[in-house]
């Protein structure tokens, strides 16, 4: 067995997960098993079901990749397709599976990347393709630390403040961003999603947070048809709705139900943490202006 740490959990895994932080054998919070999918899930797959959600079990099937099963926030079981690329399988483990496990543990997880600016966490949220990884990568290249990529859990217990729990030291960066930000493409592993579409895996071990970092602000990126980058603080219902809208796995959360403790945690985030919306021109590379506005805000 292999032991790792990620998202504030100790993980015991039958599968090697080299992208995570390895730790010594110890009591674990979550177990990852291979090819032990429960029979009732196998039957649902045979009946052409592709996903299922209830209070204790979440599962989903990805064509040509495999079946993924998450139970009680304590167990992840995967059954990869024979021809599936291991690196593709692991991306679903690191993203959706861990996010669902945290959800089952009643942890609020936002769909966003988080960087460490002088000991404070700045979380960049938004829809897929909004520009989260582009801005996060640029901030990281300015020398700021890395906390999370795409899945950002908020811890309500550490140091009596809201903190972001570190994920693992890898950022996924689109090829276009790699080229715009002058990365050496030959130095990084990549995933080929389709012809001409590559996602590169950039190690952030040298600047990775090892402990939870206090959350300073949340910034939602929104591509628009406007010609300039803008940044505005959100208030009232719009602020609360923005937090809810960016919950990772909102479909699963809706199916399972929003329990009182989870609702209280979301409300506390909206109450305590400033939330901003950054609008950027669609189809333009404006990351320098985005950084400028962000640095002005934090000065």
Image (tube, helix red, strand yellow):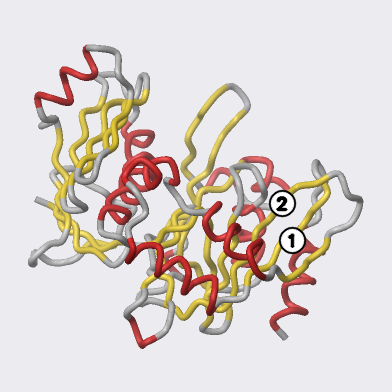
Contact (Cβ within 8 Å) of mark 2 with mark 1: yes
- In-front residue for pair 111/83: 111
Q: Residues within 10 Å of mark 2 (few under 14, many from 20)?
A: many
Q: Where residue 185 sits: x, y (%)?
A: 59, 44
Q: Is residue 78 left or right of residue 162?
A: left
Q: Is residue 40 above or below residue 11?
A: above
Q: Residue at x 30, y 56 (%)?
A: 102
Mark number displayed over residue 222: 2
Q: Residue at x 57, y 63 (%)?
A: 240
Give the quadrant of the C terminus: bottom right
Q: Is residue 64 above or below residue 112?
A: above
Q: Alpha-carbon distance for marks 2 and 1? A: 6 Å
- In-front residue for pair 275/294: 275
Q: Quadrant of residue 125?
A: bottom right
Q: Is residue 121 left or right of residue 181?
A: left
Q: Residue at x 80, y 50 (%)?
A: 285
Q: Where residue 68 sits: x, y (%)?
A: 26, 34
Q: According to the image, label 1 marks what residue?
A: 278
- In-front residue for pair 243/112: 243
């Amino acid at each position: 067995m292999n032991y790792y740490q990620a998202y504030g959990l100790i993980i015991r895994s039958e599968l090697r997960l080299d992208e995570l932080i390895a730790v010594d054998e110890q009591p674990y919070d979550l177990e990852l098993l291979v090819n032990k999918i429960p029979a009732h899930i196998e039957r649902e797959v045979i009946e052409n079901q592709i996903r299922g959600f209830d209070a204790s079990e979440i599962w989903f099937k990805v064509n040509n990749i495999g079946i993924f099963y998450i139970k009680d926030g304590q167990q992840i079981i995967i059954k990869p397709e024979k021809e599936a690329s291991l690196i593709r399988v692991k991306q679903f483990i690191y993203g959706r599976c861990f996010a669902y496990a945290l959800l089952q543990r009643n942890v609020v997880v936002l769909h966003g990347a988080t960087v460490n600016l002088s000991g404070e966490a700045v979380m960049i949220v938004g829809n897929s393709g909004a520009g989260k990884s582009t801005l996060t990568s640029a901030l990281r290249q300015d020398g700021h630390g890395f906390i999370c990529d795409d899945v950002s859990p908020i811890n309500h217990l550490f140091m009596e403040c809201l903190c972001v729990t570190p994920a693992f030291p890898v950022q996924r960066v689109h090829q276009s961003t790699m080229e715009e930000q002058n990365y050496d493409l030959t130095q990084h592993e990549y995933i080929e999603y389709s012809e001409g579409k590559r996602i590169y895996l950039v190690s952030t071990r040298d600047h990775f947070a090892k402990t939870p970092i206090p959350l300073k602000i949340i910034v939602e990126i929104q591509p628009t048809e406007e010609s300039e980058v803008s940044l505005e603080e959100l208030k009232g219902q719009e602020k609360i709705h923005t937090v809810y809208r960016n919950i990772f796995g909102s479909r699963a959360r809706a199916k399972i139900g929003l329990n009182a403790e989870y609702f209280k945690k979301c409300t506390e985030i909206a109450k305590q943490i400033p939330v901003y919306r950054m609008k950027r021109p669609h189809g333009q590379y404006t990351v320098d202006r985005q950084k400028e506005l962000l640095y002005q805000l934090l000065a």
